Amino acid sequence: MDKPQTLKGFRDFLPAEVRKRTYVSNTLKSVFERYGFEPLETPALEYAQVLMGKYGNEADKLLYTFLDRGGRKIGMRYDQTVPLARVVSQGQNTLPLPFKRYQIQPVWRAENTQKGRYREFVQCDMDTVGTDSLLADSEIIACVLEAVQKLGFNNLKLLINDRKNFAGILTAYITVIDKLDKIGRDGVIKELTEKGLSQTEAEELFNTVERKEITHEVKQVLTYLEPQTSKGLLVEYKPTLARGLDYYTGVIFELVAMTSGGLSLGGGGRYDNLIGTFAGKQIPAVGFAFGFDRIVETMSEEGLFPDEIIGTKVLITLFSADEKVIRKALDLSFILRQEGINTDLWVDESAKMEKQLKYADQKNIPYAVIIGPEEVEKNVVMLRNLKTREQKQVSIEALIEEIQN
Amino acid sequence: MDKPQTLKGFRDFLPAEVRKRTYVSNTLKSVFERYGFEPLETPALEYAQVLMGKYGNEADKLLYTFLDRGGRKIGMRYDQTVPLARVVSQGQNTLPLPFKRYQIQPVWRAENTQKGRYREFVQCDMDTVGTDSLLADSEIIACVLEAVQKLGFNNLKLLINDRKNFAGILTAYITVIDKLDKIGRDGVIKELTEKGLSQTEAEELFNTVERKEITHEVKQVLTYLEPQTSKGLLVEYKPTLARGLDYYTGVIFELVAMTSGGLSLGGGGRYDNLIGTFAGKQIPAVGFAFGFDRIVETMSEEGLFPDEIIGTKVLITLFSADEKVIRKALDLSFILRQEGINTDLWVDESAKMEKQLKYADQKNIPYAVIIGPEEVEKNVVMLRNLKTREQKQVSIEALIEEIQN
């Protein structure tokens, strides 16, 4: 057949990349658990009826839907909020509320692909469902702040506002005002006039929004966050913050990098009407979604990944196909693995040493062990540091100690 | 809309279940890394052409395929071996060989659903690609044995055979012989006669297979495994073991529970012709696939999950909506989380204490903390053990110590 390819907008993740992604998701999970959030997983496929009409007309076009062999119209997971609503509805009599859940799974959207936009990408959501207490809003924010700190970010801030500040203003205008950081004040005014307002009306609208005083709800959340903010974590009231989605009903917030021109790394807020869609009654909720890919990319750029995420610590090479040499290598691999050291054993008895060391280099393995006839004889090994290219004969005990440090 | 449902053969995983599954996959991953295997992830969707014709006609019918909005025929991941072959082919000039990778992702098959068979399930594969050394076969087996030991299984054995023992025997007969453990010797003979052999021929064929001597390859692998088997791990030669799949070419093996009537928990072997399909040349490989769902189910039945997989350690209740009480609860949640304790904070100021304690019970949270006006005054807390239902006033230091033990 032709040269096989991946589909546009879809990615293979090779080991080094998976390790970064796993590091991010494991770090986030540990913080979510610290705050009492629990994991949920839902299927990749749902009845299309569950998904359709929940995200708006434009979004419906981006759903991957098809007929299965049984003639059912089905669709692929598009986000994690609608499946959450379904789970909450189905569990109405059994699921203890509030339900504090996190979910980290891929979703699929038939988007136009462009830089940084994929058709398969991981969403990372945390939500508290079943309470309208502002303690829940503040807990989500506290958790987000701790999570990004734990990932190593130190120049982020969380912008906060109240969707109620936009009461009575047309969605079209809100969307424009939300673009303030991208297009500036003049840009906003200009776009507002393009939407039909006069210059004066546009300026007045913008000024009114910009001067909105902090609401009682935001004030309360900030009070609850004092233990966090007293530790130097930045939360900043921003009356022009709107967050795109229609469904927010209360406090909204966005995590932005202070470098990189205010790049958004995630956002969320209170949405009291969406989760109850299936249950046929109001179920208040508040949540946050991390921009998983963007976090991984930003951490790579800023060098925030620790060295330890390199998996394999040592390669045991094969000096020759001699029985004794192989036995010694096998026994050593057994010992090192028992000691908890991630150990790769070269398996091709006929390969040149040069090839073996090159393999270790390519895989970023920091150490190689060489066991030649002399080492077998003396019951020692040659330990080679692949960065410094220095090597020395050491005992097995010394080998273990050196690698473990 | 109608009451929402999940599709037949698809499952939601609620928190307790996700925690079990995460425990299994994290344990397996740590052992894979210990043996120098590296993680790979491939997309959920592939060009249908990549998938079709790789698994046989019957399997092609089980593929989820459809046309996307661009008119491309695409299909959902059916296994992890064909995507691996594609990745190896695409990476021919850049991927260091041997490529030792593990992959733990969901796959989709439009199977008839029945007990224990799902349309969405997780596969957990490890493979070494690019070498025909028997050291690779033995390393895979050693890794499997260590993995199941680490999961807590102590009554498993690994059956081993060589596919070459079946050279010249029709696939139809091999499939029957492979069922020995399920239907017994007489059952095998009977089914062989139903496939056209006379009674004598059937008995002769079966006896020939059963008396096959251990091959050089199996012998060599067993020698390499001595460090493991000397530790008491059971590897047993079984000449009637065939493993269903056509594509095996050498040593094959299967992991079975000695209880539960020899339930298979995974299997694998050498397959030297499959991976090269896309590359147009032979690329030898050996691998193993764990039955992920079956492992989780068996561990549940045998009580092998440790208690620590319960996430949340303590619920801080809200005694009243009094400002001071809330502040104290918030501050305590901050302190406990800083101490690394997974802490849930009740957020609904108006809920009765009884409801809060019931919530903790339902979620299997072992401790609850109650802070009433008296505790605020004295700067202590009431610590309630939800299993014994005992409670006592303690200082915050004592609280941390008790929960951490």
Image: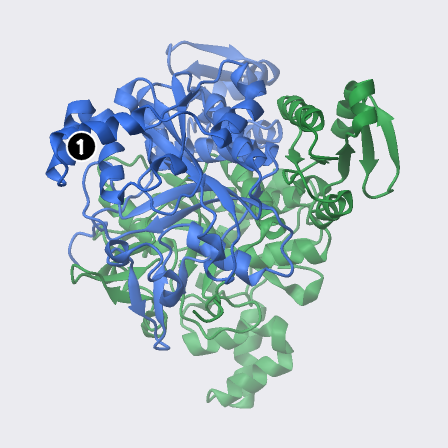
Chain colours: A blue, B green
Q: Residues within 10 Å of mark 1 (few under 14, many from 20)?
A: some
The amino acid type of the residue labelled 1 equals Glu
- Is residue B242 shown above or below A331? below
Seen at 36% across and 39% down, the residue is B98
Q: Position of residue B85 (x, y in %)?
A: 30, 51
Q: Position of residue A195 (x, y in %)?
A: 14, 40
Seen at 28% across and 58% down, the residue is A60
Q: Foreground residue, A267 or A41?
A: A267
- Picture quadrant of residue A262: top left
Q: Residue B84: tell me if it is visible.
A: yes
Q: Residue B53: tell me if it is visible.
A: no
Q: Secondary structure at mark 1?
A: helix
Q: Please give left or right for residue B268 compared with residue B369 in the image.
A: left
Q: Please give left or right for residue B146 compared with residue A47 in the image.
A: right
Seen at 34% across and 37% down, the residue is A166
- Picture quadrant of residue A73: bottom left
How many numbered circles does the render carry? 1
Q: Position of residue B361 (x, y in %)?
A: 75, 47
Q: Which residue is mark 1?
A: A201
Q: Foreground residue, B264 or B10?
A: B10
- Is residue A198 shown above or below B177? above
Q: Please give left or right for residue B228 compared with residue A146 in the image.
A: right
Q: Chain letter for mark 1, please.
A: A
Q: Quadrant of the C terminus of chain B?
A: top right
